[in-house]
Image (tube, grey):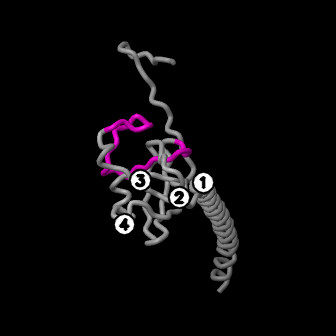
């Protein structure tokens, strides 16, 4: 019996120190996981705030929309692109070229996203001129004009493409 008592007495301090070592390691792992989760949540929050800021409407207008197409097919737009009535584009008198705009047909509650690549319309009382493809998607081709809501999102400018000379050096203008 004495041997058994001595064995238990010798094991107890070893078990006791190992137990606290395991508890300390567990607490450390818990703290690290908590920090990682918080860091991940903060990162998600920052991404959400950045995306929200990028989609805040910067322009809203309600008015008449018209569409243009066949007579302008192949002509140069204000942006320098060739007009294609089959693309989702539009003309605006004041929005920056390249702006993405959501246009809603208020009579049929249909929506379309277009890119501003031209100037116009020039008819009084109209706020936007749509390509044939956009007009078709909004269901306004036969009618010609329709009341719409125009909402533009934040305009992100594309960085200018760098130009290089034939020897590979960058050309500054």
User: Between 171 and 44, which is closer to the camera in this rendering?
Assistant: 171
Q: Earlier in the sequence, mark 1 or mark 2?
A: 1
Q: Earlier in the sequence, mark 3 or mark 2?
A: 3
Residue 15 bears which disc, if any?
none
What residue is rendered at 69% in x and 77% in y? 9
Q: Position of residue 172 (x, y in %)?
A: 50, 18
User: Between 141 and 16, which is closer to the camera in this rendering?
Assistant: 141
Give the mark toward the camera: 4 or 1. 4
Q: Quadrant of residue 17?
A: bottom right
Q: What residue sits right under mark 4 in the picture?
A: 139
Tell me whether circle 1 and circle 2 mark residues in contact (CB < 8 Å): yes
* Residue situated furthest front in the rendering: 124
* Residue situated furthest top in the rendering: 167
Q: Position of residue 107 (x, y in %)?
A: 46, 71
Tell me whether circle 4 and circle 3 mark residues in contact (CB < 8 Å): no
Crowd around label 2: few <14 · some 14–19 · many ≥20 (10 Å):
many
- Give the extent of the magenta segment: 75-96
Q: What residue sits right under mark 3 in the picture?
A: 130
Q: Describe the element under mark 1 as helix, strand or loop.
A: strand
Q: How far apart in space, not on screen, are marks 3 and 1 (Cα)?
A: 17 Å
Q: Is 79 above or below relative to 133?
A: above
Q: Position of residue 112 (x, y in %)?
A: 42, 61
User: Between 154 and 65, which is closer to the camera in this rendering?
Assistant: 65
Tell me whether circle 3 and circle 2 mark residues in contact (CB < 8 Å): no
Residue 59 bears which disc, if any?
1
Q: Describe the element under mark 2 as helix, strand or loop.
A: strand
Q: Describe the element under mark 4 as helix, strand or loop.
A: loop
Q: What residue sits right under mark 2 in the picture?
A: 150
Q: Earlier in the sequence, mark 3 or mark 1?
A: 1
Q: Earlier in the sequence, mark 4 or mark 2?
A: 4
């Amino acid at each position: 019996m004495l041997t058994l008592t001595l064995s238990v007495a010798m094991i107890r301090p070893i078990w006791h120190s190992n137990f606290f070592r395991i508890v300390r390691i567990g607490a450390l792992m818990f703290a690290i996981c908590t920090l990682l989760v918080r860091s991940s949540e903060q990162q998600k929050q920052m991404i959400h705030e950045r995306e929200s800021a990028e989609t805040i409407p910067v322009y809203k207008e309600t008015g008449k929309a018209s569409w243009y197409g066949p007579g302008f097919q192949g002509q140069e737009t204000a942006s320098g692109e060739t007009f294609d009535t089959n693309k989702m584009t539009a003309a605006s008198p004041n929005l920056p070229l390249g702006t993405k705009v959501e246009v809603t047909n208020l009579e049929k509650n249909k929506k379309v996203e277009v890119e501003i690549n031209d100037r116009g319309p020039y008819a009084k009382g109209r706020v936007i001129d749509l390509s044939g493809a956009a007009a078709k998607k909004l269901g306004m081709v036969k009618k010609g004009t329709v009341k719409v809501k125009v909402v533009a999102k934040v305009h992100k400018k594309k960085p200018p493409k760098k130009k290089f000379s034939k020897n590979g050096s960058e050309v500054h203008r």
